[in-house]
Image: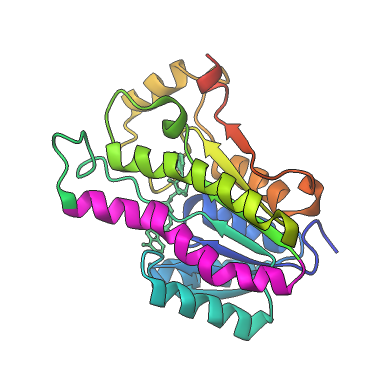
Amino acid sequence: MGRLGGKVALITGGGMGIGREAALLFAREGARVVIADIDAAAARAAAAAVEAAGGEALAAVGDVALEADVARMIAEGVGRFGAFHVLYNNAGVLWKDRDRSVLETDERWWDRVMAINLKSVFWVTKHGIPHLRRAGGGSIILMGSVSALAGFTRAQDAYTAAKGGLISLGKSLAIQFAKDRIRCNVIHPGIVDTPLQAPYLTEALRREFAAGIPLGRIAEPREIASVALFLASDESSYMTGAELVVDGGFTAA
Ligand SMILES: NC(=O)c1ccc[n+]([C@@H]2O[C@H](COP(=O)([O-])OP(=O)(O)OC[C@H]3O[C@@H](n4cnc5c(N)ncnc54)[C@H](O)[C@@H]3O)[C@@H](O)[C@H]2O)c1
């Protein structure tokens, strides 16, 4: 059956990076996955990769910041697979050029970063929780960041605030829906080698990051996806309202 046998998982931002890795991993462990992404080509390619590996996947194309898109993508998933058990809120953007200090950031970029990184969880849970209830319970996973725990010396204030907001929202969801056997936990990755970081990760910056990380390197996407797999599975059945830091020891140092 696999560790997620019988489950249906929504993975937002599943077209690339950590989300794509999670889609492949979840499917390998028996889940049927709905890959919800704004990038149609990436979503379809990820779904095709899952199917090529013997899994079942649906590519749902839309913007997680928009209620109508989220409601439609969830409906498409239910139409194909009949239920949802896991809502993995993975989609996020890091725009270091536009999202900087409060002194330098335009309102439009502040609002867009908040809408993708925080408001998206409002829409996914508003439209997804009724399906988890119907399924008799489930797991909600939020993607925080070590920036929400430590702040960054190079300011990305909208990103940091959105990720901080997820911590509080996650606790509220955990408490509210525990009676429905719905759990909600947050993962705080450190730096991960994905397309999100690619525009910024010069060799010099990679070395600088690595020097501050006790494990001596940045993470591979699968090292975060495997933690999401644990939270999605019943192996984490007694965990809710928790935060898992997956940062190679960065915040401990
Ligand atoms: N990579 C890191 O270093 C790192 C560190 C901490 C936290 N995170 C978080 O992990 C999550 C995944 O990051 P990643 O590095 O894999 O990113 P990524 O950029 O590699 O992939 C993100 C995916 O989300 C999709 N996406 C972006 N905006 C969207 C929208 N409006 N609607 C639907 N889909 C959208 C993209 O098309 C892409 O497929 C994000 O929430 C990110 O903030 C990443």
Residue 79 locus on image (x, y percent): 61, 86
Point 46% across, 29% down: residue? 149
Query: Can residue 114 be found in the magenta stretch?
Result: yes
Residue 120 on image: x %, y %? 43, 60
- Residue 84 is left or right of residue 169, and the answer is right
Identify which residue is drawn at 51% across, 22% down. 250
> Looking at the image, which residue sits at the far bottom?
79
Number of marks in the image?
0
At a point 58% along the width and 44% down the height, the residue shown is 171
Residue 11 x %, y %: 56, 62
Residue lying furthest right: 1
Residue 247 makes an appearance in the image: yes
* Near-viewer residue (47 or 71): 71
Report if residue 126 lies within the magenta region: yes
Left or right of 42, for residue 99 = left
- Above or below, 8 against 198 in this view is below
Query: Which quarter of the figure is the N terminus placed in?
Result: bottom right
Q: In the rendering, at what x and y percent does residue 206 appear?
A: 39, 27
Q: Is residue 13 left or right of residue 4?
A: left
Indicate how the structure is coloured in the image: rainbow
Q: In terms of secondary structure, what is the magenta stretch mainly?
A: helix
Residue 197 in view of the camera: no
Residue at 68 percent of width and 66 percent of height: 53
Q: Quadrant of residue 148?
A: top left
- Establish if 65 lies above or below 22: below
The magenta segment: 108-136
